[in-house]
Image: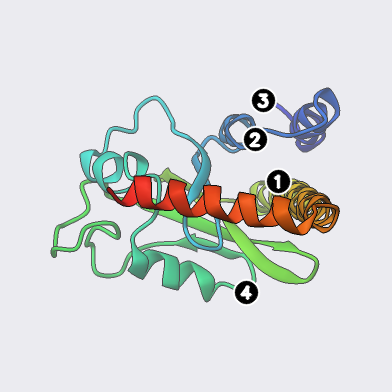
Amino acid sequence: MATLLEKTRKINKLIQSSENVKYDDMAVTLRNVLGANVYIADIHGVICGHSLLNDFECDVMIDKVINVGKFPKAYVAWLKKMEFTAANLQTESGLCAFNDKETACLFNGKTTTVVPVYGSGQHIGSLIAARFNEAFNEDDLLLAEYGATVVGMEMLRRQLREAELESSRRENERKKRETAQLAIETLSYSEVKAAVAILEELKRSNEE
């Protein structure tokens, strides 16, 4: 059986092998080291990555969550309340957490651990691990929290890249407007008048 150090090294290897960590790859690695179903979701409940154990075949989970690509609203609201790791949670009602109707959970003894994902001091997502008939021990929780830290770093990197792309797009649009304005300013009065006439003609043609 792999030791805690060996399991930690598997996570480290994933980080070191790629500049950008893929969420699904992270979920697979955590599934293997935890022996649990793993889901990585952003703060809105959108599933960024997931990996299931081979013997997990819950139709409700597949239909209501995996195929939709997002957790139900009520579940997302519950996740947002998690400020710290919530370990070894079990449903008291025995009902399915993902079905709108009062449907009994098909799997008895399901244990869930939720680790909030933080970035720059803000709650930006969740890492959820679930397995059956076996509680998560301290080593498991350490690995899950370490994994959540890695996920948080990747989420921040992606947010930064998206912000940089948006900034670049806006800068390009600004330069285009300035170029267009400069071109207009260099036109003579007659050229401007001709351009306006052409635009009005094009507008009438489109309306027809």
Secondary structure type for disc 3: loop
Residue type highlighted by circle 1? Gly
Count neighbours of disc 1 (C-alpha within 10 A) and say few if under 14, some if 14 to 19, many if 20 or more: many
For disc 3, the marked residue is: 1
**Residue 26: which disc?**
2
Comparing 24 with 144, the one in front is: 24
Question: x and y percent of residue 89 in the render?
Answer: 45, 63
Count neighbours of disc 2 (C-alpha within 10 A) and say few if under 14, some if 14 to 19, many if 20 or more: many
> In the picture, residue 94 is in which quadrant?
bottom left
Residue type highlighted by circle 4? Glu
Comparing 19 with 184, the one in front is: 184
Report the mark closest to the observer, 3 or 4.
Answer: 4
**Eyeballing the image, is 89 above or below 167?**
below
For disc 4, the marked residue is: 83
Q: Earlier in the sequence, mark 3 or mark 4?
A: 3
Q: Residue at x 50, y 62 (%)?
A: 44
Report the mark closest to the observer, 1 or 3.
Answer: 1
Question: x and y percent of residue 5 in the render?
Answer: 82, 35
Residue type highlighted by circle 2? Met
Q: CA distance from mark 1 to mark 2?
A: 8 Å
Count neighbours of disc 3 (C-alpha within 10 A) and say few if under 14, some if 14 to 19, many if 20 or more: few
Q: Residue at x 57, y 58 (%)?
A: 126
Q: Are marks 1 and 2 in contact (CB under 8 Å)?
A: yes
Comparing 28 with 206, the one in front is: 206
Q: CA distance from mark 3 to mark 2?
A: 21 Å
Question: x and y percent of residue 183 in the render?
Answer: 81, 50
**Residue 94: which disc?**
none
For disc 1, the marked residue is: 147
Secondary structure type for disc 4: loop
Q: CA distance from mark 3 to mark 4?
A: 32 Å
Report the mark closest to the observer, 3 or 2.
Answer: 2
Q: Exactly how many numbered labels are in the figure?
A: 4
